[in-house]
Image: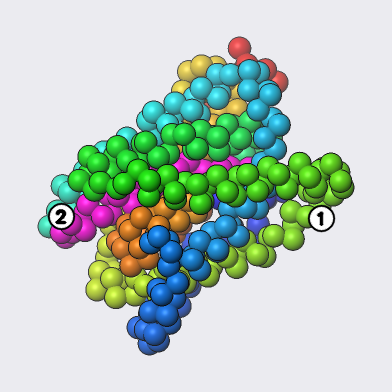
């Protein structure tokens, strides 16, 4: 998600759920009143990838990658305990607990409300969210919880690199268990399109601009230019997806709430798992809070992009990932308040690990 380097969450990010609801209403209206618009946009596909959505996703993800200083990787050996907590929670726990929690609700608790096929589709969307831990938005949560900004950069940078190698096999494995088999080439193509390309572009741009103009110019002049572009890209992406999902939403409005239930439970679970592990390891609060936040939050832009690429804009899978956008900010702001109120749990000095 997007990152804001300030000490407070931006106006757009703070009310993200409201914008999602407005985009949902606009998209549903367009899809039902002007069905020719989504039909026209549906013609622009290549290798099952929606070209308009691909362009908008790039506009969102490129600035995120641009903001991450991957030179911080050289500090990976400093205070490694917090990194181990983040890596284990994000890659060895989160995707699988997301699968388990979502399966329990979609196939057991909600079995009289959701058909088995819809449950399978919604579960696939939950898997895509669970396998993509948050990237740049973590800087916001870290700032709001008074986390160590330098350490947070290392956490984000290493997770962005792990995504390159771990996302594809984890998603393929869990979708296979769910009875949905996706060709590896298709899944790898999605990762290349929506991770590798913007990641490489961000790294190259950062290096070139820093060399020519300096790091300060990059931060204060170049990156801010993309703030409105990123916002518009996200909103247009949501409107397009909801225009294709209009009939589903009108037919099954309750499903939005049902999808949100396991996503919210998973978010709280992963946060307290990581946060608690840091406390057991006697890590400082400035490391523990961001460690909990990075696992709890999701890289929903990637999840939405892959869902659309693999299953299409009209799929229930895409709808499930978009619900992740809807619940993201209010849940994470709740966790921020919890972290700030429990900072006293961490009594060790906040300048070094034990």
Which percent across, then down, holds residue 209? 80, 47
Could you say whether the residue bearing mark 2 is in a helix, strand or loop?
helix
Q: Looking at the image, which is closer to me, 138 or 232?
A: 232
Which percent across, then down, holds residue 21? 45, 69
**Quadrant position of residue 145:** top right
Quadrant of the image containing the C terminus: top right
Give the mark nearest the N terminus, 2 or 1. Answer: 2
Q: To which residue does mark 2 refer?
A: 116
Residue 302 position (above or below residue 45): above
The residues colored magenta run: 113-140
Q: Main secondary structure of the magenta part?
A: helix
Q: Residues within 10 Å of mark 1 (few under 14, many from 20)?
A: few
Specify whether residue 322 is painted magenta: no
227 lies left or right of 336: right
Q: Residue pushed farthest bottom?
A: 33
Q: Looking at the image, which is closer to me, 124 or 47?
A: 47
Residue 98 position (above or below residue 253): above
Regarding residue 77, the answer to whether it shows in the image is yes
Tell me which residue sits at (34%, 48%) in the image: 126
Which percent across, then down, holds residue 27? 43, 75
22 lies left or right of 344: left
Tell me which residue sits at (45%, 72%) in the image: 44
Specify whether residue 124 is painted magenta: yes
Q: Residue pushed farthest left?
A: 112
Tell me which residue sits at (18%, 57%) in the image: 117
Distance in Å between CA atoms under marks 2 and 1: 51 Å
Q: To which residue does mark 1 refer?
A: 221
249 lies left or right of 25: left
């Amino acid at each position: 998600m997007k990152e804001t380097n300030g000490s407070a969450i931006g106006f757009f990010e703070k009310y993200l759920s409201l914008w999602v609801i407005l985009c949902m209403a606009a998209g549903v209206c367009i899809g039902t009143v002007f069905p020719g618009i989504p039909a026209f946009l549906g013609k622009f596909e290549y290798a099952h990838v929606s070209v308009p959505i691909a362009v908008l996703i790039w506009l969102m993800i490129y600035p995120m990658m641009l903001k991450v200083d991957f030179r911080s990787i050289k500090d990976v050996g400093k205070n490694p305990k917090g990194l181990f907590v983040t890596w284990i929670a994000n890659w060895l726990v989160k995707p699988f607990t997301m699968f388990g929690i979502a399966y329990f609700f979609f196939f057991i608790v909600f079995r009289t409300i959701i058909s088995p096929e819809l449950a399978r589709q919604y579960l696939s969307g939950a898997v895509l969210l669970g396998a993509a831990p948050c990237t740049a938005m973590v800087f916001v949560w870290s700032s709001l919880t008074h986390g160590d900004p330098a350490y947070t950069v290392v956490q984000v940078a290493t997770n962005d690199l792990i995504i390159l190698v771990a996302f594809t096999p984890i998603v393929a494995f869990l979708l296979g268990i769910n009875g949905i088999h996706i060709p590896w080439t298709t899944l790898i193509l999605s990762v290349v399109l929506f991770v590798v390309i913007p990641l490489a572009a961000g790294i190259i741009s950062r290096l070139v601009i820093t060399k020519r103009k300096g790091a300060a110019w990059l931060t204060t002049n170049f990156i801010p230019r993309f703030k409105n572009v990123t916002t518009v890209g996200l909103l247009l992406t949501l409107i397009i997806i909801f225009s294709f999902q209009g009939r589903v939403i009108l037919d099954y409005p309750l499903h939005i709430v049902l999808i949100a239930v396991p996503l919210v439970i998973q978010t709280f679970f992963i946060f307290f798992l990581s946060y608690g592990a840091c406390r057991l390891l006697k890590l400082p609060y400035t490391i523990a809070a961001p460690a909990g936040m990075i696992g709890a939050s999701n890289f929903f832009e990637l999840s939405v992009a892959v869902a659309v690429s693999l299953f299409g804009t009209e799929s229930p899978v895409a709808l499930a990932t978009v619900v992740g956008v809807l619940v993201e900010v209010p849940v994470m702001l709740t966790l921020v308040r919890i972290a700030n109120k429990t900072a006293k749990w961490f009594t060790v000095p906040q300048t070094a690990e034990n």
